[in-house]
Image: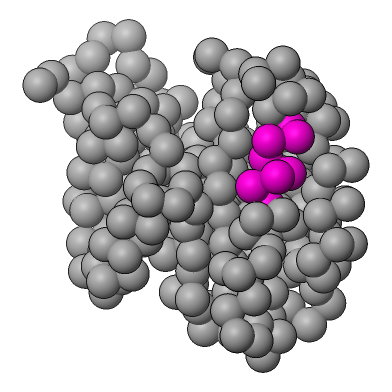
Amino acid sequence: MKPISLPGLIHPHDVSTDRQFSMNLARGLEVLRAFTATAPLLGNREISDRVGLPKPTVSRLTYTLTLLGYLTHDSQLQKYRLGPGVLSLGHPLLASMHMRQLARPIMEQLARATGCSVNLGMRDRADVVYIDSMRADSANQHLPDIGSSRPLVVSAIGRALIFSRPPDERAAIINFLKVQGADLFEQVSAAWTADQKRFNEEGFCYSHGDWRKEVHAVAVPLKQAPGDSPLAMNCTLAAYRVQDDRLVREVVHQLKDAARQLAVAQGLY
C-alpha cells in the first residue's frame, strides 16, 4: 500500500527534492513552532537547538519574522517571543469552524450536567489541539486554553481522533507517532491496546491519568460532513473526583448523547 500524505505527517527534509515545496517557508514555520507555553521566550541559539538549523539561518529567519510582526524582539534579553501576527492567523480558522458554534451550547449543557470540563479538539501533527473548552471542573489544575495541546497517543481525545479514522489514515498517523516518539508510544502501549479494544467494542476512549495522573477523561469522535477536519470531544475530571469509575458508568453516555445531538444539528442522522 502506498503511504498516504496527511497534513503534518512529514518532515521537511523528507521532501527536500520536491520542487513545489518551499524549504525556506517550512523553516520559518518551524521557528514559530519552537515557541511553546513553557518556552515563550527564546534566543537564536535556543531556537537553533530546538529546530536543528544553523544559528546563522535562524538569525535570518527571526529577523524576517520580526519585521513581519510574527515575532517580537526583547532587546534587553536579546530573545524573541511570538508576535500578534501569529494570533491573527489563528482567528480566521476558529471563526470559520461552524462546528464550534453548533457545539458550544451542547458543550455548556454537558459541562453543567456532569461537572466535567468539556473540550473540542482536532489533530495537529502528533498532538491534539483544543479549539473550544467549557471549564466546569475548577479542581482540574490543567484546564486548557483554546490552542493548547496534548500528545495524541496519551490522551483519550487524541486516541479517539486516531481510532475513528479510516484504516489507511489511521496507519499513517500511527506510523508517524511511532517514528517521532517511539519511547512515549512504548510507555503507553498497554493503555493504547486497551483503549483500542474499548473503542472498537464501545465507541469511546478512556484515559485513566495517562497524560497527567491527576486528570481522567473519556472521549468520542464527532460525525462531520465529508471534507471537514476530524474532531473529537472529551469530558475531563480531576482524579480525586472520579469515584467508582463514574466517567465510564455515567458521563460517557451523556457524552455520546451530546455527540449525537451535534450530528443531528448537522443533518448527519
Position above or below: 169 against 78: above
Q: Residue furthest bottom?
A: 240
Q: Find residue 46 and report its image quarter.
A: bottom left
| Residue depicted at x 65% and y 55% | 253
Is residue 151 in view from this perspective?
yes
Q: Quadrant of the N terminus?
A: top left
Q: Find residue 87 and report its image quarter.
A: top right
| Residue depicted at x 30% and y 36% | 170
Who is closer to the viewer here, 225 or 86?
225
Q: Find residue 174 and report its image quarter.
A: top left
| Residue depicted at x 82% and y 70% | 115
Who is closer to the viewer here, 150 or 53?
150
| Residue depicted at x 49% and y 69% | 207
* Direction from residue 217 to residue 106 in the image, left or right: right
Q: How many marks?
A: 0
- Measuring from the top left, give residue 179's x and y in whole percent: 20, 51
Is residue 93 in view from this perspective?
no
Who is closer to the viewer here, 145 or 44?
145
- Measuring from the top left, give residue 8's x and y in whole percent: 40, 34
Q: Residue furthest left?
A: 1
Magenta stretch prevailing secondary structure = helix
Position above or below: 47 against 232: below
- Was residue 162 drawn as part of the magenta stretch in this picture? no
Q: How is the image coloured?
A: one colour
- Measuring from the top left, give residue 131's x and y in whole percent: 70, 43
Boundaries of the magenta span: 255-262
- Was residue 259 drawn as part of the magenta stretch in this picture? yes
Q: Quadrant of the C terminus?
A: top right
Position above or below: 192 against 125: below
